[in-house]
Image (cartoon, grey):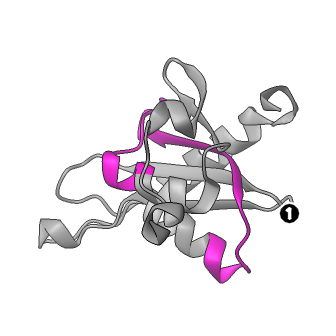
Amino acid sequence: MSDVIDWAVLRATAREACATAYAPYSGYPVGAAALVDDGRVVSGCNVENAGYGVTLCAECGLVSDLVRGGGGRLLAFTCCNGEGDVIMPCGRCRQLLWEHGGADLLVETPEGVLSMTEVLPQAFGPEALGK
């Protein structure tokens, strides 16, 4: 499936989102973009806060964009820094991506495209709540 995803479009969208990031404290803007199962592309950027723990990662904005647009499942994801380099989502954001994309979500990483099971092995998900 990775070969039918237009990664260049996702990277360009992530870079556009990154350009709007609010990162006055770290100086580290991040943009994220993902393909949804209905064909939409959703995106987000990081929004920092003087109370650092309140900062929102780019993936938070992306998931908000997903839900606001009607939901769906994420199929492919990428994120970048202010230099346009592909970067890895933090642990918290990997959990967000698992919730909305699951095991089959493809994640572009600095080492290539990986499935969420490789990015977040033995993930905790909704199915664990029923046990």
Residue 34 at x, y percent in the picture: 66, 52
The answer to whether 82 is drawn above or below residue 73 in the figure is: above
Asked whether 97 or 62 is in front, the reply is 97
- SS of the residue under disc 1: loop
Residue type at mark 1? Answer: Asp
State how many labels appear.
1
Residue 7 at x, y percent in the picture: 73, 34
Q: Answer with the quarter of the image where residue 74 lies.
A: bottom right
Taking the spot 52% from the left edge, 54% from the top edge, the residue there is: 97
Taking the spot 86% from the left edge, 63% from the top edge, the residue there is: 38
Q: Which residue is mark 1?
A: 38
Taking the spot 49% from the left edge, 51% from the top edge, the residue there is: 31
The answer to whether residue 79 is magenta is yes
Classify residue 11 as left or right of residue 25: right
The answer to whether 13 is drawn above or below residue 78 in the figure is: below
Instruction: Count neighbours of disc 1 (C-alpha within 10 A) and say few if under 14, some if 14 to 19, many if 20 or more.
Output: few
Residue at far top of view: 111
The stretch in magenta equals 66-94
Residue 62 at x, y percent in the picture: 55, 64
Asked whether residue 90 is in view, the answer is yes
Classify residue 18 as left or right of residue 78: left
Classify residue 79 as left or right of residue 71: left
The answer to whether 42 is drawn above or below residue 110 in the figure is: below
Taking the spot 81% from the left edge, 36% from the top edge, the residue there is: 5
The answer to whether 103 is drawn above or below residue 20 in the figure is: above
Quarter of the figure that contains the N terminus: top right
Asked whether residue 86 is in view, the answer is no
Classify residue 29 as left or right of residue 75: left
Residue 115 at x, y percent in the picture: 61, 33
